Image: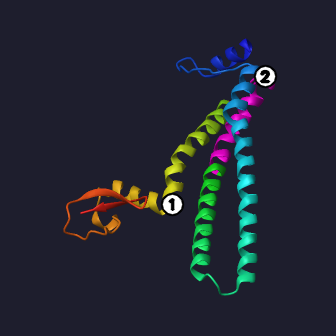
Amino acid sequence: MNSSIEQRRHSEGSNSTSCIFMVNKPYALTCSVVAFYIPLVLMVLAYQRIYITARAHALQISILQRAGGGGGGGIDHQRNHRMRTETKAAKTLCIIMGCFCLCWAPFFVTNVVDPFIDYAVPEQLWIACLWLGYINSMLNPILYAFLNKSFRRAFLIILCCGRKRYRRPSILGSGAPCTATQINGSTHVVK
């Protein structure tokens, strides 16, 4: 390990200063397993259960629709709307978690592999893997803005300084003073 530190120190050049962060094998394994791999396995198991449950519900709804024919149209519409909403939420979470895994996996794989190959991973690869993980933080608001209408609206209100164009219509009309209120779990800007 000391020879690797000296080698990296001399390859930098005489005028540059840098922090060399090198970890031993147990630390690299422990940190990566606790911070990434265990949460990854738990997320995969949770999404597997969600997927199986959603498929079972979709199958039940399809069987009920075929057997029921025309009775209970309002209830069927509510069930279908709820199922579409739940499916969209699951897809949104899946996309966000997928991006998280794809962005951070190279860093955590490199973090585990590097001590076992005598710290031979090039510095440029380390930097690229780390910045890919940082890019995930930039992607989150973009993904939420594209995938969630409520988040998109709030994001536009903040970015556009609360312009009327992006506000949700109020049930009280345009003559009331401007405040924010919650109605049925949904925030409305009331003028």
Q: Name which quarter of the figure residue 114 lies in.
A: top right
Q: Position of residue 118 (x, y in %)?
A: 78, 22
Task: Sort mark 1 into few (<14), some (14-19) or many (20+) by Cα contacts within 10 Å.
Answer: few
Query: Mark 2 sits on what residue?
Result: 118
**Which sits in the foreground, 78 or 93?**
78
The residues colored magenta run: 99-122
Q: Quadrant of the C terminus?
A: bottom left
**Which colouring convention does the figure follow?**
rainbow
Majority secondary structure of magenta residues: helix
* Mark earlier in primary sequence (2, 1): 2
In the rendered structure, the answer to whether residue 145 lies left or right of residue 5 reads left
**Residue 154 location, quadrant:** bottom left
Furthest toward the right, the residue is 116
What kind of residue is marked 2?
Answer: Asp
Q: Position of residue 59 (x, y in %)?
A: 76, 70
Residue that lies at the very extreme toward the top in this rendered image: 2
Q: Is 57 situated left or right of 181 in this image?
A: right
Do we see residue 121 in this rendering?
no
